Image: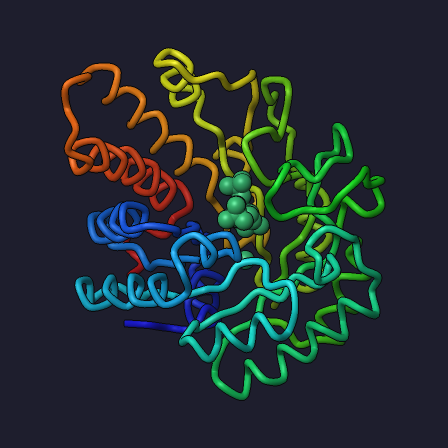
Amino acid sequence: ALVSMRQLLDHAAEYSYGLPAFNVNNLEQMRAIMEAADKVDAPVIVQASAGARKYAGAPFLRHMILAAIEEFPHIPVVMHQDHGTSPDVCQRSIQLGFSSVMMDGSLKSDGKTPADYDYNVGVTRTVVNFAHACGVSVEGEIGCLGSLETGMAGEEDGVGAEGVLDHSQLLTDPEEAARFVKDTGVDALAIAIGTSHGAYKFSKKPTGDVLRIDRIKEIHARIPNTHLVMHGSSSVPQEWLQIINQYGGDLGETYGVPVEEIVEGIKHGVRKVNIDTDLRLASTGAIRQFMAKNPAEFDPRKYLAKTIEAMRDICIARYEAFGSAGQA
Ligand code: G3H
Ligand code: 13P
Ligand code: NA
Ligand code: ZN
């Protein structure tokens, strides 16, 4: 059944677990997520970005998610719009039937320029007003996602600030977060605590302290009833990087957020964990490997089936690690 995000996150908070929110762009990702959730009995959050709408088209995305709900009626599914850049974008998604929207007012409507507090409150409050009137949940963001190593947003052409940010922008301030929640009434709040979007998060192997857990604790202590959201939460599996490079790919050395650190965040109020890059890496690795080993094969279903399997295994691992397995 289609449910609001608030419903799932309230349950997750009550039972102290976290929910992965996977980005979807195509049938294979959708199937991988649903088959994984079905296998381990987990509730589902699927999210569509502006890039996903551009690639698949909003009606295709919508009907794909509705098809998932039809095929797996026993699994609660949130249809979430990721990184809305304006109230108009969010309104259109609500009209399309999304049960949850993100208004990312940490950036201006170009999705690149860091916005000030008043702008962020203005657009987010507007979305909360019309979304709540329709029973739709709202995620806001305070602080800009980006690398604490370099100050860069992390993605060349994806979501993220342009230029170099300083530490005061890259780490969410607990007092400002509390004020923002009071001023806007958001259901969930994305915070900046050391993660960035994309595959290039950390240049050195993490030694157990990539997330600012101290900051998560301070924010959670200040707003214990707000569900915290971690963007840029891919773990960048080294085994998939290696497979990609072994079969003709060319990805540089890079590391993601260790799953154990995400689990630590979940102990301190993180309820929604956004993952896109890991599924991209797994499906690319699966295709490269299949193509290299089966040069005479030309039925796309053969290699696309491998991508479903590869992505499904990652989804299962995250549902289990975050404690959402068994909660559907
Ligand atoms: O937040 C960013 C997500 O990874 C979506 O990326 O805009 O390339 O679809 P995208
Ligand atoms: P990753 O790039 O780490 O997968 O993050 C995805 C995300 O935050 C989508 O909003
Ligand atoms: Na989101
Ligand atoms: Zn994001």
Query: How far from the left and from the top, in percent, is residue 134?
Result: 49, 86
Q: Which residue is at the front of the view, 60 or 99? A: 60
Indicate the quadrant where residue 210 lies: top right
Q: Is residue 143 above or below residue 248?
A: below
Q: Quadrant of the C terminus?
A: bottom left
Q: Is residue 25 left or right of residue 122?
A: left
| Left or right: 90, with 322 as reference point | right
x, y percentage for residue 282?
Answer: 36, 31
When asked about the image quadrant of residue 314, the answer is: top left
Q: Which of the colour schemes (rainbow, by chain, secondary structure, one colour) is used? A: rainbow
Q: Residue at x 35, y 14 (%)?
A: 247
Q: Is residue 87 above or below residue 15?
A: below
Q: Position of residue 55 (x, y in %)?
A: 43, 52
Report the label total: 0
User: Residue pushed farthest bottom?
Assistant: 133
Q: Residue at x 31, y 38 (%)?
A: 311
Q: Is residue 270 left or right of residue 280?
A: right
- State the quadrant of the N terminus: bottom left
Question: Which residue is more in the foreground, 233 or 156?
Answer: 156
Front residue of 195 and 150: 150
Could you say where residue 122 lies in the image, as x and y percent from the top left?
76, 75
**Image vertical order of residue 256 relative to residue 11, above or below:** above
Q: Please report the residue visible at 67 percent of the width from the left and 59 percent of the height from the top.
A: 141
Name the residue furthest top. 246
Task: Mark yes or no: residue 199 visible.
Answer: yes
For the residue pair 239 and 180, the one nearer the viewer reads as 239
> In this orientation, does residue 267 appear?
no
